[in-house]
Amino acid sequence: MASMSGDCPIHAPVWGCVLIGGRSSRMGRPKHLLRRAGRTWLELTVQKLMTRVDGVVLSGSGEIPGTLAALPVVPDAPGLQGPLAGLVAVFRWRPGVSWLVSACDLPELDGGALDWLLSFRHPGIRAVLPDLRGNGQVEPLLAYYDCLCGELLEELAARGSLRLSELVGRPGVVTPQPPPALRGAWRNINTPEELREIDNCCRMGKKGIH
């Protein structure tokens, strides 16, 4: 396996990764296949990422719409669970690449939030984990993971830890608070009730985190 730490290039390419391995038990159906304006959430997420990155991969075992069949699919790293399994897998698959990582259930994701994450991309930054309300609770599934972060992810995996929030406090991991106008991009949807709420908000032209 290629090195994922000290030899990471300063101007490494940035790829997008959409995690599609969740069970969606509270929604009752795969969230990434929910539709808006005739397209699945997964298709919309990929489209938004593609405007900011060099390539997009799907991570996990979820069903993939035919329109996205040409995208690489990276299986979860063996022996791991949860989002960490997907992140470790893509870092092993493409060493030397930095990642914008997104969950599949962020219907208000937009380019402004992606630009904001990328604005923190400087030498020595290993990860950008947004703290939406400034209370120490970070959002690791719309976040930036520099190619320098691979070593930290492997350390979590080796310890048997599945919580990406344990990266907080490590050198090079920053937790900025997004501007209020961008925070809706991190709003995830888990239940049919939340889906109806956000659909109603969209029909009324409203956005935001609640």
Image: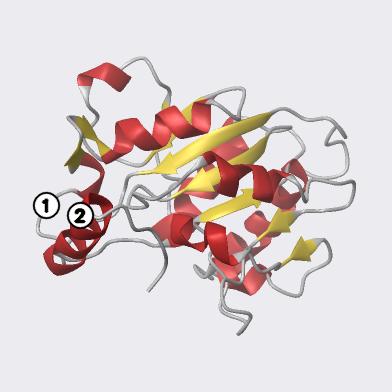
- Asked whether 55 or 1 is in front, the reply is 55
Kind of residue at disc 2: Asp
Residue lying furthest left: 28
Q: How many residues crowd around disc 1 within 10 Å: few (fewer than 14), some, or many (20 or more)?
A: few
Residue at (78% x, 30% y) in the render: 12
Return the x and y of residue 149 as percentages of the image width and height: 72, 51
Kind of residue at disc 1: Arg
Residue at (9% x, 59% y) in the render: 28
Chain-order first, disc 2 or disc 1: 1
**Residue 82 placement: quadrant:** bottom left
- Asked whether 178 or 137 is in front, the reply is 178
Asked if residue 38 is positioned above or below residue 31 in the image, the reply reads above
How much space separates mark 2 and mark 1, taking CA atoms?
17 Å
Return the x and y of residue 165 as percentages of the image width and height: 58, 71
* Residue 29, numbered circle: 1
Asked if residue 146 is positioned above or below residue 13 in the image, the reply reads below
Residue 81 is at least partly visible in this image: no
Residue lying furthest front: 204
Return the x and y of residue 70 as percentages of the image width and height: 36, 14
Question: In what element is the residue under mark 1?
Answer: loop
Q: Which residue is mark 2?
A: 199
* Residue 92, numbered circle: none
Q: Quadrant of the C terminus?
A: bottom left
Question: In what element is the residue under mark 2?
Answer: helix
Q: Quadrant of the N terminus?
A: top right
Residue lying furthest bottom: 135
- Asked whether 182 or 84 is in front, the reply is 182
Residue at (28% x, 40% y) in the render: 41
Asked if residue 169 is positioned above or below residue 9 in the image, the reply reads below
Residue at (69% x, 57% y) in the render: 128
**Residue 132 placement: quadrant:** bottom right
